[in-house]
Image: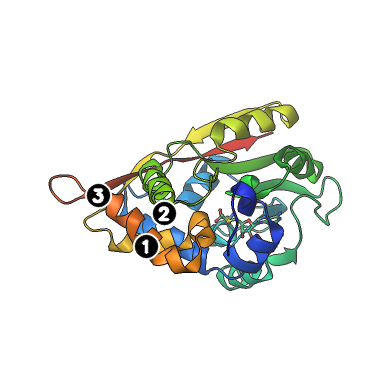
Amino acid sequence: MAGEGAGVWTDPVYLRGEQYRSAGNLSSRQSIYAYQQPRIDLPKSVLDLAAPTGDEVVVDIGCGNGAYLAELLRRGHRGPVVGVDASAGMLRAASLAAPPALTLVADAGMLPLRDAVCSLALANHMLYHLADPALGVKEFHRVLAPGGRLVVVLNAHDHLVELRRAAEESWYDLGLPTYGGFRERVGLEKGEELLRVEFGAICRHDFVSRLVLSDRRPLEAYVRSMFDTALVPERARERYVQGVLDRLEPDSGGVLEITAHPGCFICS
Ligand SMILES: C[S@@+](CC[C@H](N)C(=O)[O-])C[C@H]1O[C@@H](n2cnc3c(N)ncnc32)[C@H](O)[C@@H]1O
């Protein structure tokens, strides 16, 4: 796919039709966390903080391949659980991961749900895909019952900073046009600002770790799944991917370290 700018991050045609057509790209990115030290199981850690009672009506907005839905069910959640995603392919994966969950193909900006329908809403690693994230937060608030909570996961600005830097350098080395997508479009700071408009109480938790790799090979699938890689003209894509990998410098012991820094907000 050719194009430029950060537009792909919010382009529903690209998101539904290419990047998230199936769970492949997301799974490639998730699998790199096998190299994380210390290992943080993000769905488990986030849900530990949210501490659901087990009886809530839960709506997971932009549920992807169902990592949070599966974790809820693993905990024996008894209340109704609904996964919403713009991609039918993602929901197929979510249904396999969490068979009892109901699934709905819908846009997060216009949820086909009545006001105050749920007591726990999740919107994890997805706010940056909405053209108007402020309206998205308003919509998430609309479906929450009084006393309900919204959980939002986003990345800090130093998340994968080494990899993004390498990607940016490889991009401009190929003479590609200006592209703003190497920075977080909605990171933790921006996210907090948006959430404060709608919610009175917000608790932030950061999860900082390192991806520790003794060679660059496990990163290759990750680099191929990235948003910027999809924008590189096909004839230059191999050079681009190799350029990113070659720029990642291992330390003197041959070990490569990359910062991982997501965080979550519990809002009420
Ligand atoms: C990075 S994945 C996150 C998946 C999951 N929440 C997680 O944290 O593992 C982003 C998901 O948001 C979905 N998505 C993107 N834009 C959306 C929109 N406007 N409405 C609903 N889902 C959307 C994508 O299809 C994708 O499954």
Which three-letter amino acid code belongs to the residue tagged 1? Arg
Q: Percent from the top left, x then y, of residue 62?
A: 65, 55
Instruction: Pick whichever of labels 2 and 1 is earlier in the sequence.
Output: 2
Q: Quadrant of the N terminus?
A: bottom right
- What residue occupies the far left of the structure in this picture? 253
Are the residues tagged 3 and 2 within 8 Å (C-beta)? Answer: no
Left/right placement of residue 134 relative to residue 193 reads: right
Q: Is residue 266 above or below residue 224?
A: above
**Front: mark 2 or 1:** 2
Q: Percent from the top left, x then y, of residue 250?
A: 21, 48
Which three-letter amino acid code belongs to the residue tagged 3? Leu
Q: Percent from the top left, x then y, of residue 206?
A: 46, 35
Which residue does the numbered mark 3 point to in the structure image? 256
Q: Percent from the top left, x then y, of residue 100?
A: 65, 69
Q: Dot 1, crowdedness within 10 Å: few (<14), some or many (≥20)?
A: some
Are the residues tagged 2 and 1 within 8 Å (C-beta)? Answer: yes
Q: Dot 3, crowdedness within 10 Å: few (<14), some or many (≥20)?
A: some
Which residue: 70% across, 58% down? 12
Left/right placement of residue 236 relative to residue 34 reads: right
Which residue does the numbered mark 2 point to in the structure image? 174
Which residue: 59% across, 52% down? 4
Which residue: 51% across, 69% down? 24
For the question of whether residue 78 can be seen, the reply is yes
Which residue does the numbered mark 1 point to in the structure image? 239
